Image (spheres, rainbow, N blue to C red):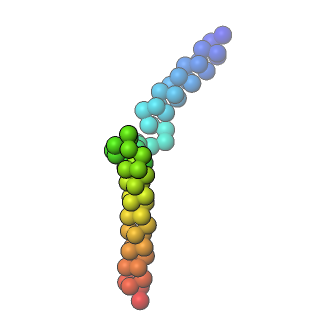
């Protein structure tokens, strides 16, 4: 009986630590990843206008692609 209670308590503790972000990432990292995900998902756009939401998502995705292309190009210029 005591072992069952110990196992239940350990599971509760692990669940609590997992919710607080202690197992996988710090709370700051969790907040940052949530912020980036929300940015690219266009959570700040007007949700009643589907065109605005998809336009924002597409524009932000293209901006990310352009940024990556610029970084690759600049690194190519440095390594010559």
Residue 5 position (above or below residue 79):
above
Q: Residue at x 50, y 25 (%)?
A: 13
Which image quadrant for residue 65?
bottom left
Quadrant including the C terminus: bottom left
- Observer-nearest residue: 49 or 68? 49
Q: Looking at the image, is 16 positioned above or below residue 25?
A: above
Q: Residue at x 57, y 24 (%)?
A: 11
- Extreme-top residue of the structure: 1
Note whether residue 32 is visible. Answer: no
Q: Nearer the viewer, residue 66 or 7?
A: 66
Image-based side of 61 in relation to 10, left or right:
left
Residue 50 image offset from top left, x and y in percent: 42, 46
Looking at this view, is 72 or 55 the one in front? 55
Residue 62 located left or right of residue 11: left
Percent x, y of residue 7: 61, 21
Which of the 4 image quarters holds residue 72? bottom left
Q: Position of residue 67 (x, y in %)?
A: 38, 68
Q: Residue furthest bottom?
A: 80
- Image-based side of 14 in relation to 62, left or right: right
Picture residue at 38% right of the left edge, 44% below the top: 49
| Residue placed most toward the observer, 51 or 39 | 51
């Amino acid at each position: 009986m005591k072992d069952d209670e110990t196992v239940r308590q350990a599971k509760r503790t692990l669940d609590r630590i997992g919710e607080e972000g202690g197992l996988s990432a710090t709370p700051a990292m969790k907040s940052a990843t949530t912020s980036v995900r929300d940015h690219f998902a266009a959570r700040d756009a007007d949700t009643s206008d589907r065109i605005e939401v998809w336009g924002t998502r597409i524009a932000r995705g293209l901006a990310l692609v352009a940024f990556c292309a610029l970084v690759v190009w600049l690194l190519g210029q440095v390594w010559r």
